[in-house]
Amino acid sequence: KLHLGLESSCREGVSDPGEMGGAVARLRGSGVDEEQVSHVQESTPSLLLEPRLLDLLPALLAALDARALAATLLCCRALRGVDADGLWEQHCMERHWRLKTCGPGTGTTTWQALFAAFSKMTPEERWEAEWRGGGFGNIDPSDFFASSLEPRATRSREVRFAVGQVIVNRSGPYRGVIAGWDEVTKVPKEWPSLQQHRQPWLSKPHYSVLVEGNASTYIVDDNSELERIPGEVSNPEVGMLFSHFNGQVYVPRPPLRAKYPVDDALEPLLQRRFCNACAKEDTKLMCGRCRIVRYCSEDCRQQA
């Protein structure tokens, strides 16, 4: 019941800490022992005194023996020491609600206030608030689809892929090489995908991908993953942006490298240690020439 009450509080937005006095008065009026009221008042954060939870407290306190009540109070004291702002940030980011893009559209400046505001909106209202607040309508058309020449000097931890990596998209399905990325969506508002689905990914990283064949696309990372055994991608634009394929990733030419100076496409693949012939894990043999490609056995190395 305690957890259910907390979940309800999080969904609806916590009450103002200034309402503590009124909440305690309601608790006294429900017939709870005064000593227990004092314990709750001293040890419970205002989050636990959300009005819906008050209806559960009398039954909860009556059901607890002394040992269980002591454990509950210790838990409440621990909650007081939690980094509340960090928790609200976590809740927002799980829903792809970024404070820097969603906050201005709702007039909020804290993660908690953003969560409370967005939780009460419809998906369409949230999308419009994010579009306004993030300034997506003011993006220069020359920057659409990862075309901006401005160097990406930093990388958000949300950016999963790096330039030069070969990925597979399961929903296509198709495979391709990452040719660029933006930390947030940079497309015109009339872009078909925006009109068809008001997806909550305006503030998610997007990737420019050269697809096998003669096409390119601009996608969010949903349903995409690194190709287990990376191979070359046949696309006429690949040679314009990359110098060669080293067996694991494409090596960017200087102009592309200058745009993404902190990207390290190779390291994540080397950490996987997959055999480049059979995809078996925990490989121990390495190509004697490039020192990059790995194999699980001599047979696989000879076969390659």
Image (spheres, rainbow, N blue to C red):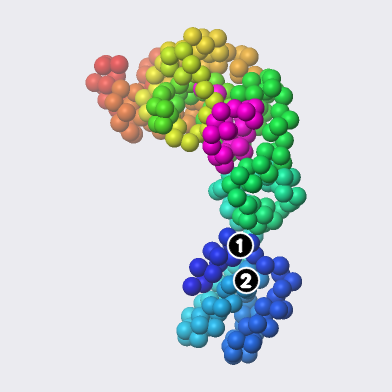
- Horizontal and vertical percent position of residue 10: 59, 61
> In percent of the image, x 57 and y 23: which residue is there?
180
> In percent of the image, x 42 and y 27: which residue is there?
172
Viewer-closest of 98 and 68 = 98
Q: Which mark is residue 12?
A: 1
> In percent of the image, x 55 and y 16: which residue is there?
252
> In percent of the image, x 61 and y 37: which residue is there?
202
Left or right, 106 with respect to 221, comes to: right
Q: Main secondary structure of the magenta part?
A: loop
**First-in-chain label (2 vs 1):** 1
Cβ atoms at labels 2 and 1 below 8 Å apart: yes
Q: Which mark is residue 138?
A: none
Q: Which residues are magenta?
A: 182-209
Residue 143 can be seen, yes or no:
yes
Give the total number of marks visible in the rendering: 2
- Residue 207 included in the magenta stretch of the image: yes
Left or right, 290 with respect to 25, comes to: left
Viewer-closest of 120 and 149 = 120
Label 1 residue SS: helix
Quickly name the residue at label 2. Answer: 50
Residue 70 can be seen, yes or no:
no
Mark 2 is on which residue type?
Answer: Glu
Q: CA distance from mark 2 to mark 1?
A: 10 Å
Mark 1 is on which residue type?
Answer: Glu
